[in-house]
Image (cartoon, coloured by chain):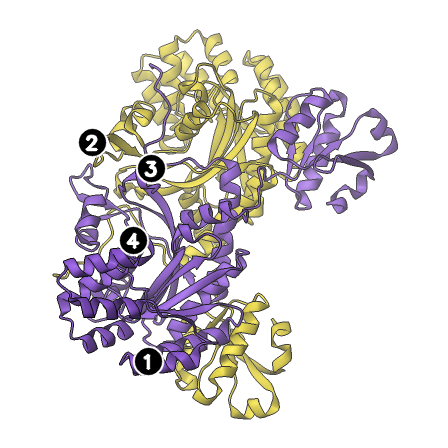
Chain colours: A yellow, B purple
């Protein structure tokens, strides 16, 4: 066999332990939060019939999709998001009792331009409530978003909330046509990236008159704390002819605050969400210390989508975390705790005559729940301590003929550079 | 958009919560065992360059591989197992300190014939030690296998062990050619499926003479407990001219027993493992109560494979659990605990005036670590209790105006059909 240069595809990554250990902890934490709210896990296949996915993500989506003919000449495609598979599952399994709160944490694939710092394989963490149009369900999703970020140790996040109903009422008051509404939403969705001027330019290009452009921009400037600014928001609602839908939005946020009193929810009328399918609340989440990462957690209500494969409509509301983006942001903020090894202790193996004791020590520590590695070759102490240090194993357990006579082991803390003698019988207790 | 029939591809499955909850628990348990032994997590991409995978799994493998041209006309293939990607990672990351104990629990894809009850997307749980040729490493993998099954609540497993060195020494003593050795290994590998007669037939067809066939079959009949049968095994070693390699194998198993005293390790000379790449110990694991599922955990030493992309050899030994097969076996044995919901409690919502209290109850329970769902519509009690029952949520928390006056809630255990009044302040403690 000729040697092949070992390499990964552009946009695809290996996660070596030093990345994968904290990444897995993040996933565990997100999963625990989702389950704390009673969301149930779903797993769907990586491959779907292409017809299930094609046409659901716009022209851009079809272009970026990994789609091919399988060995049986079936037209198949790799999972592009977790929402369309959810819609398929709901249609296919009519027996699922609703409201159904499901979560899925899985990779998806998109042949993105990697020059923009995007990956072609990345994880989404979705939680959705299917089959309820109650405002309580919207509030539950907002509370879940806040609780999940809090559980990850993030303090400075702001959940910025708007509603398609508010947007539509305002657009109606301006007399926009349906086509103008869609292009206005798409233009304003880019405000964080291209700024007000960029949005104004795009709106003007789409044939919207100067006066209306100014009103749209003023609308998008509203960003007010949902609690402290309640009176102001009520006033704004009247001024902008969005009194009723805004009041409904505020009452949703009020409920969310009761569920998560420490969260920060802001009514931000610049939030547009580019996708067409939203019908009610929409939200994005920025980290104040790392706004350059954009939204790390977004979602909203989309009452038309989940029913697309069914004979009847299925209301739904949900949130999605972009795991890789959030990981990068937390890494930059120093919120990822470095952890290079799963093992807490290494049994040093330097006297072949004591091998049985080393095995017994490993066995006992493991039985007591201590993650324990064992050095496989009889080698000198220094080499093994440097192995432990390099691997990031914090404690070395040293046991030679002297220790054997005393019935003790030396536990060396390689992080602190301290060591301590512990009775063999007490070693599990030490950890 | 015209309605599309919602369906999954043949050999691909959705895991709805009632399956995914226990399945995820299994994965968590396996992961915890692997980490208990100090194995570190690795994640590799689903897609690899085709040249990395093609030709590594025989003609059969190339035929079953999901291989296609991506949008950039790259020849790519979906992950077929977890071992070749490991070999690539090792070659690509020379800085990884060895011995390296890595695990990976991930799906792989093979376009298998689904009529044989096989899936095209299934999970492997691999743990390998890379960069050590010490017998201690072999013993560690055997102990890991036993500890992992024990942690899953399985008691009646038998780890059946052989060694390619023992097999080779015996085949040499019979004077088999290299070609005959390979076909003998492949024939004997099928003994559990086709029986002795089937193996004899295949061996004869491959031109092996009657007398040798009889000796090969007698060899494959040796299946002796590695502890209780030690004396007998030593005798057999001499008779079969495999004294030294068998002694080496026995000493590995002796070490494994010291690490996992409750395990059952059997020297079983019928174990052959069809794959060519094994070089040392080989093992398979059967559940005595469900032998029809074949081996649920297999592995061995393969010193040539991991170095295939490197300039030098890298010894390796590992074990792999076929998650789906093990799940099916445990399901049949009644060892999968049914669990349909992640939520432990449902806050019943039947008096709109008390909504704030319901929200506070949910918030408090969640903050105390109790997985809690909230009914989203104000509805009658009966409907909500039947929702909880159908979902598999065990406790309903009932709070109406009478309870509000008393400062108590009713906790109804839907499994036992009992209920109890608990002070509002003590509700978290109750769980």
SS at mark 1 in the image: helix
Q: Is residue B427 left or right of residue B182?
A: right
Crowding at label 2, few (<14), some or many (≥20) Cα neighbours within 10 Å? few
Q: First in sequence: mark 3 or mark 4? A: 3
The residue that disc 4 covers is B194
| Separation (CA) of disc 2 from disc 3 | 15 Å
Crowding at label 1, few (<14), some or many (≥20) Cα neighbours within 10 Å? some
Rendered image: mark on residue B11:
3
* Dots 3 and 1 on the same chain: yes
Crowding at label 4, few (<14), some or many (≥20) Cα neighbours within 10 Å? few
Q: Disc 4: which chain?
A: B
Vertical arrangement, residue A368 with respect to residue A66, above or below: below
| Separation (CA) of disc 4 from disc 2 | 33 Å
Task: Give residue A240's position: percent from left, percent from top.
Answer: 54, 14
Q: Disc 3: which chain?
A: B
| Separation (CA) of disc 3 from disc 4 | 25 Å
Kindly identify the residue that appears in the image at 73 percent across and 23 percent down.
Answer: B381
Q: Is residue A19 left or right of residue B186?
A: right
| Separation (CA) of disc 1 from disc 4 | 27 Å
| Separation (CA) of disc 3 from disc 1 | 45 Å
Rendered image: mark on residue B303:
none
């Amino acid at each position: 066999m000729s040697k092949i240069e070992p390499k990964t595809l552009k946009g695809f990554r290996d996660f070596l332990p030093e990345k994968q250990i904290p990444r897995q902890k993040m996933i565990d934490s997100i999963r625990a939060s989702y389950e704390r709210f009673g969301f149930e896990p779903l797993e769907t296949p990586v491959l779907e019939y292409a017809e299930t996915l094609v046409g659901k993500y716009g022209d851009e989506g079809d272009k970026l999709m990994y789609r091919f003919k399988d060995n049986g000449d079936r037209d198949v495609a790799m999972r592009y998001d977790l929402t369309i598979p959810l819609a398929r599952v709901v249609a296919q399994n009519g027996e699922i009792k609703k409201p159904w709160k499901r979560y899925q944490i899985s990779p998806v694939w998109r042949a993105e331009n990697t020059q923009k710092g995007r990956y072609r394989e990345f994880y989404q963490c979705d939680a959705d409530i299917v089959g309820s149009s109650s405002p309580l369900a919207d509030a539950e999703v907002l509370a879940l978003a806040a609780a999940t970020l809090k559980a990850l140790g993030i303090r400075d996040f702001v959940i910025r909330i708007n509603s398609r109903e508010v947007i539509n009422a305002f657009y109606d008051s301006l007399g926009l046509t349906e086509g103008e509404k869609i292009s206005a939403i798409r233009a304003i969705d880019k405000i964080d990236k291209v700024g007000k001027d960029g949005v104004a330019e795009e709106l003007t290009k789409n044939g919207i008159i100067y006066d209306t452009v100014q009103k749209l921009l003023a609308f998008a400037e509203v960003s007010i704390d949902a609690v402290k600014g309640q009176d102001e928001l009520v006033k704004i609602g009247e001024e902008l002819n969005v009194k009723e839908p805004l009041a409904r939005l505020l009452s949703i946020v009020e409920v969310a605050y009761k569920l998560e009193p420490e969260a920060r929810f802001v009514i931000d009328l610049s939030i547009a969400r580019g996708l067409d399918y939203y019908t009610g609340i929409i939200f994005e989440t920025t980290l104040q210390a790392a706004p350059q990462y954009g939204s790390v957690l977004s979602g909203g209500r989309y009452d038309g989508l989940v029913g697309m494969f069914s004979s009847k409509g299925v209301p739904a509301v949900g949130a999605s975390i972009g795991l890789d983006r959030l990981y990068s942001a937390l890494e930059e903020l120093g919120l990822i705790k470095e952890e290079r090894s799963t093992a807490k202790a290494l049994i040093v193996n330097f006297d072949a005559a004591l091998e049985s004791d080393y095995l017994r020590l490993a066995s006992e520590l493991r039985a007591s729940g201590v993650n324990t590695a064992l050095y496989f070759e009889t080698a000198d102490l220094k080499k093994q301590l440097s192995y432990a240090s390099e691997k990031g194993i914090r404690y070395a357990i040293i046991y030679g003929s002297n220790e054997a006579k005393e019935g003790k082991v030396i536990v060396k803390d390689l992080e602190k550079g301290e060591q301590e003698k512990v009775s063999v019988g007490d070693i599990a207790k030490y950890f």
